[in-house]
Image (cartoon, rainbow, N blue to C red):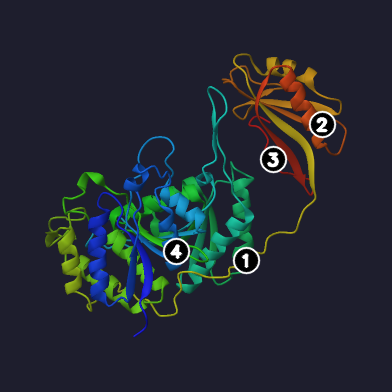
């Protein structure tokens, strides 16, 4: 017999220990060849003053086993506490979050009986980079970071996943009608990579109408690939409309490590009552078994679970009179599933995991893009100032300009207010003055520094400056609303 595969487990908080116990019982009975290293994470660790919820020894375990089966945790409310999920994903390079969302009609109530959609969510960047600032008394800022390498990795993963799992189509969700630079980059990379997979249909949608269509006609979709924030939102929508968010598991895949978890939270209000549904964590463990090459055990567990659903043996969250046959608790869930190991569903589509189906695709090549000529052509200076309008700010700022610079625009919260601003525009204390080279092709950094020194000497509070570049002559910065 082969040596067991070592994995790291964490029982988590709330209902976490209960659903992990049930999952481990099933794994043991299935013949899965595993050895566990258990770590402590979550609320108790936060309370010991470790602000990311995880001790250094736990990181050592993850780097040693490279496979993590994690129950839900509770993040304490209040400042300073970091999301452990976001921390783990970023630190270990878990760039791809995979969430299969499948309906189990007629045994689990749903308005979408034929739904079978996989959400592939970028996991490392976007607004989840967590770069935020309070800039003025009235205005805060969050920085949305989208990179070409990050976009390439997740989009190519989605197409490789679709090909390996005999999926027919990949749809990108973006919002590049508004965020033309950041989401626009993701869309351009999607089109580039899609051209390399002529056997797979490719389409893109604006995320708002895409989410509406997902909620209304999910059968239109097969694999959806999208940015971090959009993916977080639509994967919960997709899971819920299958019948219950409690049935969904997910994987977080990187080049070296992987994490598997239920998509729901720690549900502290039902902790200890013995009624929690372990399905999400159990199906995450099935994804884990496929990942480590134990497809036979994965198939046995998944088909036994489908048979139990089909037999109407349901936990309280999906129990429905006239459809369900018995209402069971957390411990009985494991016992009933174990009794069905080796059986297959008669109505639901049986799970099949051929040995060659991969959940990770190592060595995904990043093509990048040719280097472009980059030129500094201007600077946006952000200022805090109460009261006044665009004309007032322009009159205050223009005398401070060094030779060779000109003020071309003043905006407030992104809306142009000078020149030719609308008198109805509501203004806060957050102003942006856009300065460009006057007659010169390119600015020098020294000119920017001189401008900021003059602003400071005048006693104006500049809270941020952003250099404006062109790349091969194309603007690398957005216009203000109203321009």
Label 4 Cα crowd, 10 Å radius (few <14 / some 14-19 / many 20+):
many
Q: Is residue 79 above or below residue 85?
A: above
Residue picked out by circle 4: 258
Circles 3 and 2, Cβ within 8 Å, touching? The answer is: no
- Is 318 on the left-hand or right-hand side of 263? left
Ranked by sequence position, the earlier of labels 2 and 4 is: 4
Residue picked out by circle 3: 477
Q: Foreground mark, 4 or 1?
A: 4
Ranked by sequence position, the earlier of labels 3 and 2 is: 2
Q: Foreground mark, 3 or 2?
A: 2
Label 2 Cα crowd, 10 Å radius (few <14 / some 14-19 / many 20+):
some
Q: Residue at x 58, y 41 (%)?
A: 178
SS for callout 2: helix
Residue picked out by circle 1: 195
Q: Residue at x 83, y 37 (%)?
A: 444
Question: In this orientation, which residue lies closer to the viewer: 77 or 303?
Answer: 77
């Amino acid at each position: 017999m082969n040596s067991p595969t070592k994995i790291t487990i964490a029982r988590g908080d709330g209902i976490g220990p209960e659903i992990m116990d049930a999952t481990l019982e099933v794994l043991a009975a299935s013949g899965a060849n595993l050895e566990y290293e258990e770590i402590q994470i979550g609320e108790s660790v936060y309370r010991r003053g470790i602000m990311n919820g995880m001790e250094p020894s736990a990181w050592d375990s993850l780097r040693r086993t490279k496979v993590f089966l994690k129950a839900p945790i509770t993040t304490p409310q209040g400042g300073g506490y970091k999301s452990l999920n976001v921390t783990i994903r970023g630190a270990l390079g878990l760039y791809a979050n995979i969430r299969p969302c499948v309906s189990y009609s007629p045994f689990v109530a749903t308005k979408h009986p034929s739904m079978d959609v996989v959400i592939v969510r970028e996991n490392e960047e976007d607004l989840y980079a967590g770069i935020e600032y309070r800039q003025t008394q009235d205005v805060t800022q969050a920085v949305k970071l989208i990179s070409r390498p990050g976009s390439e990795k997740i989009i190519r993963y989605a197409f490789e996943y679709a090909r390996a799992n005999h999926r027919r189509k990949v749809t990108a969700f973006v919002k590049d009608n508004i965020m033309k630079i950041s989401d626009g980059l993701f869309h351009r990379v999607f089109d580039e990579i899609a051209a390399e997979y002529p056997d797979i249909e490719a389409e893109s949608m604006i995320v708002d109408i895409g989410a509406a269509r997902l909620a209304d006609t999910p059968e239109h979709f097969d694999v959806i690939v999208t940015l971090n924030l959009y993916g977080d939102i639509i994967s919960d929508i997709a899971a819920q409309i299958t019948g219950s968010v409690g049935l969904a598991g997910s994987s977080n895949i990187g080049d070296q490590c992987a994490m598997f978890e239920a998509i729901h939270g720690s549900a502290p209000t039902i902790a200890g009552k013995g009624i929690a549904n372990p399905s999400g964590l159990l199906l995450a463990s099935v994804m884990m078994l496929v990942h480590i090459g134990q497809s036979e055990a994965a198939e046995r567990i998944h088909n036994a679970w489908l048979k139990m659903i089909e037999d109407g043996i349901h936990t309280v969250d999906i129990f429905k009179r006239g459809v369900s046959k018995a209402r069971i608790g957390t411990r009985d869930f494991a016992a009933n599933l174990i009794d069905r190991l080796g059986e297959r569903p008669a109505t639901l589509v049986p799970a099949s995991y051929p040995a060659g189906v991969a959940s990770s695709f190592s060595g995904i090549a990043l093509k990048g893009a040719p280097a472009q000529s980059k030129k500094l052509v201007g600077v946006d200076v952000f200022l805090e100032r109460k009261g006044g309008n665009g004309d007032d700010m322009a009159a205050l700022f223009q005398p401070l300009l060094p030779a060779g610079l000109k003020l071309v625009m003043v905006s407030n919260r992104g809306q142009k207010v000078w020149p030719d601003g609308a008198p109805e525009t509501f203004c806060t204390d957050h102003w942006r003055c856009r300065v460009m080279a006057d007659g010169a092709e390119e600015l020098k950094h020294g000119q920017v520094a001189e401008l900021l020194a003059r602003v400071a000497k005048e006693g104006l509070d500049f809270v941020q400056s952003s250099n404006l570049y062109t790349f091969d002559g194309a603007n690398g910065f957005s216009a203000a609303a109203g321009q």
